[in-house]
Amino acid sequence: MSFVALKEANIIAIHGMALISAAGEQGISARKIEKITKCSINHLFKVLEILEKFGYLKSKKGPHGGYALNKPANEITLIELVETISGKIDEQIECFVDNRKILNKIVLNNLCHELTEYFISYLKTTKLSDLTPQAKRILDNYNKKEG
């Protein structure tokens, strides 16, 4: 069965960018993102490096370093982040069950296609700024616990 699916790197990119957006101009360290998201630090660094290379992030080295957005959160869509990490999404994905197209028409009635269309539409219309309030609450709660 084929659906548009997010890879771990996509999840890291979206969650990391939401936390970076929530942190504001002061930025946030990769270590803090790692602790909040519980992702691999090595994988996180690879994702952040790609996002920085493509102009979404700026980084500051040193003990008070971290990552900050390089462009406004309301100008970044989720599909941009996904495609930056994984390449262009094929919007013509078809769903097959046991490689028999007829089962898709009988059993699933184009459900896979409709779900894929909905998901791609969501990625295209959702901006990073839409995720920022929830990420801010998560970041604030984390900071209180670490406080």
Image (cartoon, rainbow, N blue to C red):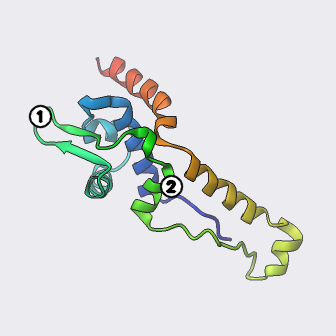
Amino acid marked by disc 2? Ile
- The residue lying at 85 percent from left, 73 percent from top is 105
| Residue 48: percent from left, percent from top | 30, 51
The residue located at (38%, 31%) in the rendering is 22
Q: Which mark is residue 42?
A: none
**Structural distance between the alpha carbons of marks 2 and 1:** 33 Å
* Neighbourhood count class around disc 2 (C-alpha, 10 Å): few under 14, some 14–19, many 20 upward: many
Choose top left, top right, bottom left or bottom right for residue 140. top left
Residue 122 drawn above or below residue 5: above
| Residue 63 badge | 1
Neighbor class of circle 1 (other Cα within 10 Å; few <14, some 14-19, many 20+) is: few
Name the amino acid type tagged 1: Pro
Residue 79's disc is: 2
Q: Is residue 129 above or below residue 143?
A: below
Please tell me whether mark 2 sits on a helix, a strand or a loop. Answer: helix
Please tell me which residue is depicted at 49% across the width and 68% down the height of the picture.
88
SS class, disc 1: loop
Q: Is residue 60 left or right of residue 72?
A: left
Q: Residue furthest right?
A: 106
Name the N-terminal-most of marks 2 and 1: 1
Outermost residue toward the bottom? 100
